[in-house]
Amino acid sequence: MASISANSLHFLTALLYISIPVIFTATVVDDLNNLQPPPDFKSTITNNCRRNPSLRYCNSTPSDLHQIFKSTIVASHLCNISGNPNCVESFPKIDLHAQPKIAPLYLSFTFFWKYCPLTILSIDLSNNSLTGDFPTDVFYCSQIQALDLSHNDLSGDLPIQNFSLLENLTFLNLSYNDFTECRISDTHFFERFNSSSFIRSGLVPNHKEFRIKAVLLLVGLPVLVLVMVVFWGWLCFLQIRNERKFRPSMLKVATDGFSARNLMMKNGRASAYRGVLRDGSEVRVEIYLDAMSRENRRRFVEQCKILVQLQHKNIVPVLGWCGGRRLRAVVTEWIDGENIETLLSSCNPPWKQRVQVILGIAAGICYLHQEWPQVGYNLKTRNIMLSADGEPLITRFKLLDDHHSSTKKTYEFGMFMLEIVTNRRGSKELDQKSVDIVEWVKSNYPDNVENVIDKRMKKTVEIVSEAAEVLEFGLTCIDASNSHQPSWDRICDLLSDISSTAIPSASPDHWTSRVQRGGGRKHVHHRGVQ
Ligand SMILES: *[C@@H]1O[C@H](CO)[C@@H](O)[C@H](O)[C@H]1NC(C)=O
Ligand SMILES: *[C@@H]1O[C@H](CO)[C@@H](O)[C@H](O)[C@H]1NC(C)=O
Ligand SMILES: *[C@@H]1O[C@H](CO)[C@@H](O)[C@H](O)[C@H]1NC(C)=O
Ligand SMILES: *[C@@H]1O[C@H](CO)[C@@H](O)[C@H](O)[C@H]1NC(C)=O
Ligand SMILES: *[C@@H]1O[C@H](CO)[C@@H](O)[C@H](O)[C@H]1NC(C)=O
Ligand SMILES: *[C@@H]1O[C@H](CO)[C@@H](O)[C@H](O)[C@H]1NC(C)=O
């Protein structure tokens, strides 16, 4: 057998000394199963290690002897298959390039890699149909300078941190694999090798993909900025909305400690204060005195959130609310004007203005009916305000009132019309007995309409006839037992017609007949309202 020079590194020294037949007739696996280490194998290894302590098996325990022996057999096979010129003298490369049948077998011999001969400087496992994870066993050959795993089907994460073991690696090719795209925090790793080591490996963008990403970045960045601006705006918006929530302390300051001087109204269920917010704006603070259950407080806040969204020229702007445990309040804009009750009793408004008030309130009601049917409101003439520019305004709402039905709303609107024409206060309660104003109007309608029209008003024939129409319409609305009570949809259609054509010189001309035409009602026309 070959002689051993003390200076040269003989990777197969153990093997050579024990005269293994180098010509393998059976498969590697058979050889591994059949061959036993010769008796002097241990002393051979010991000698080798004395000569070259850096050999990988030198630190192994005696029980590894069989594994070491097997690894030498694999090594001799692999050396030959890899086309190394003199496997007795050296084993500089593992070259299984384009040998897909045997590469996986050799990769499965972990014991071989564990004792990887120090002479191997290059490993070429390219084009071997390797699948699955990166073959980490090759890291045992930490001295290698070249590693080619290109043209395989390797997948999964690349064990980048293990590459630090291969400190002398200068050539790497992982191209044409299917690794999981890595979130490269280890930029050092990619500095060692240029992009041609990773062509279509899944690891590093090739130039085309890189360009796509660059374009995406160029487009994406402005979009991102835009999204952030919108998001920021939205946050501001939310904040503004949140400003609609008043803390009790804010309301206390605004109303000067709820001072009697600022008290505008008080009844069993609510009280209202005039107040001034920090920004100087005047407000009306309506405080709900009823004790509320937790559930009702939640509903109260829900309803307030709706109120602040109302937007109509005949509805007072709701600025916010306070939904605390100790204080529930609704804050609306302060209306510097008269209420309709006062207007009626002290000013004797002309007919035209009365009609405008009715049409304005009807427009507000129709808006609520169509957009926010769940909102209840208060139609007492005392609570309808006339704004500085002459618009009538609904200023109070019915919160937590489950009984404010559509029928009741119609009834209240009917009463409202009657009061405007007659300047008499009626009962707003649908089910109350004292409905004398209604009875009184009915008894005078249609033959003595002049008797019920506000006495102070100048009564031309035209006005009387128009007032008669309004009264008839009002009575129709009031007569809730009448199955022909006009629906709000119809009332609103009609009023929007009238308003769009007749305002400001609105005339209630043919109100009822128009309702009839739509609803097929005949008897209203001839005093059908009993
Ligand atoms: C090496 O392999 C070749 C075929 O590739 C074979 O002819 C030769 O006998 C083998 N040598 C040894 C020592 O196994
Ligand atoms: C890969 O190996 C196949 C044979 O298995 C061969 O035909 C092909 O040319 C090889 N491709 C490369 C890039 O080496
Ligand atoms: C890398 O090469 C140097 C110099 O040849 C050598 O000292 C070192 O042991 C090598 N590293 C490994 C891990 O083999
Ligand atoms: C590769 O790295 C992992 C984690 O750093 C480590 O657990 C593993 O032993 C390493 N593999 C080799 C072959 O060194
Ligand atoms: C990558 O490095 C190799 C040498 O390792 C060189 O031949 C090749 O030109 C380099 N390619 C690029 C794109 O830098
Ligand atoms: C890796 O292999 C691919 C395909 O064979 C080749 O195009 C590329 O140049 C190689 N990279 C290096 C660094 O040799």
Image: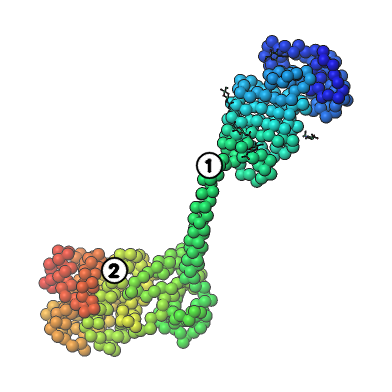
Which is more toward the observer, 38 or 129?
129
Say few, some or many: other residues with alpha carbon within 10 Å of mark 1 (under 14 / 14 to 19 / 20 or more).
Answer: few
Residue with the mark numbered 2: 366
Camera-near label (1 vs 2) is 1
Which is more toward the observer, 208 or 480?
208
Residue with the mark numbered 1: 208
Figure quadrant of the N terminus: top right
Q: At x 65% / y 23%, what residue is drawn?
A: 96
Figure quadrant of the C terminus: bottom left
Residue kind at label 1, given as amino acid type? Lys
- Whether residue 99 can be seen here: yes
Give how far across and how far down residue 218 sits, in percent.
52, 52
Q: Quadrant of residue 79?
A: top right
Q: At x 11% / y 80%, what residue is drawn?
A: 447
Mark 2 beta carbon near ligand 4 (under 8 Å) = no
Give how far across and how far down residue 282 sits, in percent.
44, 81
Give how far across and how far down residue 126 sits, in percent.
62, 28
Q: At x 22% / y 82%, what residue is drawn?
A: 352
